């Protein structure tokens, strides 16, 4: 499998920096979904300064968890969202390089 990984820099409440990772996965029907990518300790995290980047992994070395959560939005309405986490235990950097096409239409 192949996934496009983005790194997002964040800080703890104490001000300590850390990275979170988001991934884009494409389903067999062509639908693209965004998931939080979690890397198990034994395989390490991608280097944030190399992101966005494509990684490759075997299905046997990963799993996807889904959790439905309810929350109250800014106008007081109750909403439900599905949180997805992709857990990866072994991966390699893909030879395919990421090219940003977001501004191609301009």
Image (spheres, rainbow, N blue to C red):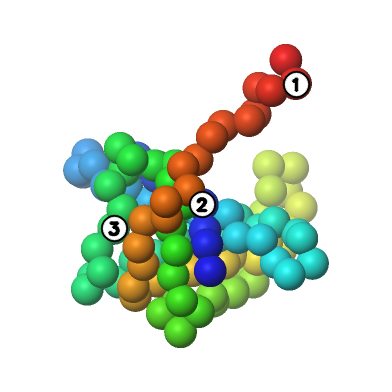
Q: Which residue is mark 3?
A: 45
- Identify the residue at horizontal 36%, vertical 67% (top origin): 91
Q: Residue at 66% across / 61% down in the picture?
A: 26
* Spot occupied by residue 7 in the image (x, y as percentages of width and height): 40, 45
Q: Image quadrant of residue 90? A: bottom left
The residue indicated by pointer 1 is 105
Q: Is residue 63 left or right of residue 7?
A: right
Q: Residues within 10 Å of mark 3 (few under 14, many from 20)?
A: some
Whichever of labels 1 and 3 marks the residue nearer the N terminus, that label is 3
Q: In the picture shown, does residue 37 fall above or below 41?
A: above
Residue 58's spot in the image, x, y percent? 46, 76
- The residue under the point 42% across, 51% down is 95
User: Earlier along the polypeptide chain: callout 2 or callout 1?
Assistant: 2
Image depth: mark 1 or mark 3 in front? 1
Q: Residues within 10 Å of mark 2 (few under 14, many from 20)?
A: some
Q: Tag on residue 4? A: 2
Depth check: give the residue in front, 29 or 39.
Answer: 29
Q: In the displayed image of the protein, which residue is found farthest to the top?
A: 106
Q: Earlier in the sequence, mark 2 or mark 3?
A: 2
The answer to whether residue 48 of the structure is visible from this angle is yes
Q: Mark 2 to mark 1: distance in Å?
A: 22 Å
């Amino acid at each position: 499998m192949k996934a496009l990984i983005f790194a997002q820099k964040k800080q703890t409440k104490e001000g300590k920096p850390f990275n979170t990772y988001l991934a884009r996965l494409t389903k067999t029907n062509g639908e693209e979904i965004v998931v939080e990518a979690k890397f198990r300790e034994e395989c390490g995290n991608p280097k944030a300064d190399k992101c966005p980047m494509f990684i490759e992994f075997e299905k046997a070395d990963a799993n996807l968890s889904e959790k439905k959560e309810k929350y109250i939005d800014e106008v007081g309405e109750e909403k439900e969202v599905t949180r997805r986490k992709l857990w990866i235990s072994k991966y390699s950097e893909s030879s395919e390089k990421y090219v940003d096409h977001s501004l191609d239409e301009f």
